[in-house]
Image (cartoon, rainbow, N blue to C red):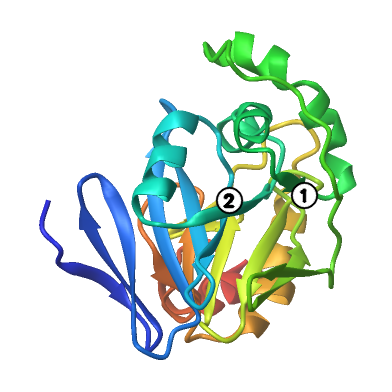
Amino acid sequence: MSARAVQVNDRVSFAARRGYLDGMTQPASPIGVFIAPVTPLQQNCTVVWCTATSKAAVIDPGGGVDMILAEVKRRGLTLDQIWITHGHIDHAGGAAEMKEKSGVRIEGPHPEDQFLIEGLAAQGQMYGMPEARTFETDRWLDEGDVMTLGETVWEVRHCPGHTPGHVIFFNRAARFAQVGDVLFKGSIGRTDFPRGDHQTLLDSVVTKLWPLGDDVTFAPGHGPVSTLGEERRTNPFVSDSALKRA
């Protein structure tokens, strides 16, 4: 694939190549990013790293564990942590395997998603992903928690609605967020799963995501990257005009 940029802010630009979405960091950027769709559901497993130390975190290893670990190594990165946005199989199904193979900590999601983590094996049977296994997180996350990766700092926001324990990860310095299945380019997360709630999801977008700033580039759990400003202007579910009509 070409390296044509598909979304840009002043710190991180993204380009599609070799099946990945690569974050090609600008000189001043404290972070690097690449995204690799995994599982039959094409979930955006996202690897972020500190450019000063090359320490990396894998966000939502739903599957493709060997491929992701090999790519981390190929890029000269050191895997330091695994972060989980929520407990659905396409996001968390490979976490146990990745922890076993790497020896690093799992952080997240919020404890309200414990019932989903405990049910990963059952989810695997339901969705034809028998390799999925439950795991014990090393740290449950909540609103206002801070994640340290090398010399970078990431803020945690609890954004329920798609699941009750969904969290997102925000790097203020790079103006970048990984938002899981809360918000997509042109859409929002489903709320017809157990303990999902549509109004709660809308509230999470408005009260937790929009205040981060229109200039924030985000990677969703599925599909292309976008900016919060673009979605606030044009998203048919949560744009300012759509919410006024509701």
Give residue 72's position: percent from left, percent from top.
Answer: 43, 49
Answer above or below: position of 53 versus 110. Answer: below
Marks 1 and 2, how far apart in space? Answer: 10 Å
Mark number displayed over residue 59: 2
- Total labels: the figure holds 2
**Is residue 238 at least partly visible in the picture?**
no
Q: Position of residue 232 (x, y in %)?
A: 50, 77
- Residue 137: image x %, image y %? 82, 40
Which residue is depicted at the point 30% across and 50% down? Answer: 20
Residue 32: which quarter of the image? bottom left
Q: Considering depth in this image, is 43 or 238 the residue closer to the camera?
A: 43
Classify residue 100 as left or right of residue 25.
Answer: right
Mark 2 neighbour class, 10 Å CA radius: few under 14, some 14 to 19, many 20 or more: many
Q: Which quadrant: the C terminus?
A: bottom right
Task: Report which residue position mark 1 lands on.
Answer: 108
Q: Amino acid at mark 2?
A: Ile
Q: Residues within 10 Å of mark 1 (few under 14, many from 20)?
A: many
Name which residue lies at 81% across and 37% down.
195
SS at badge 1: loop
- State whether residue 217 is above or below residue 64: below
Nearer to me, 140 or 225: 140
- Amino acid at pointer 1: Gly
Is 13 drawn above or below residue 120 in the view shown?
below
| Residue at the left extreme, as displayed | 2
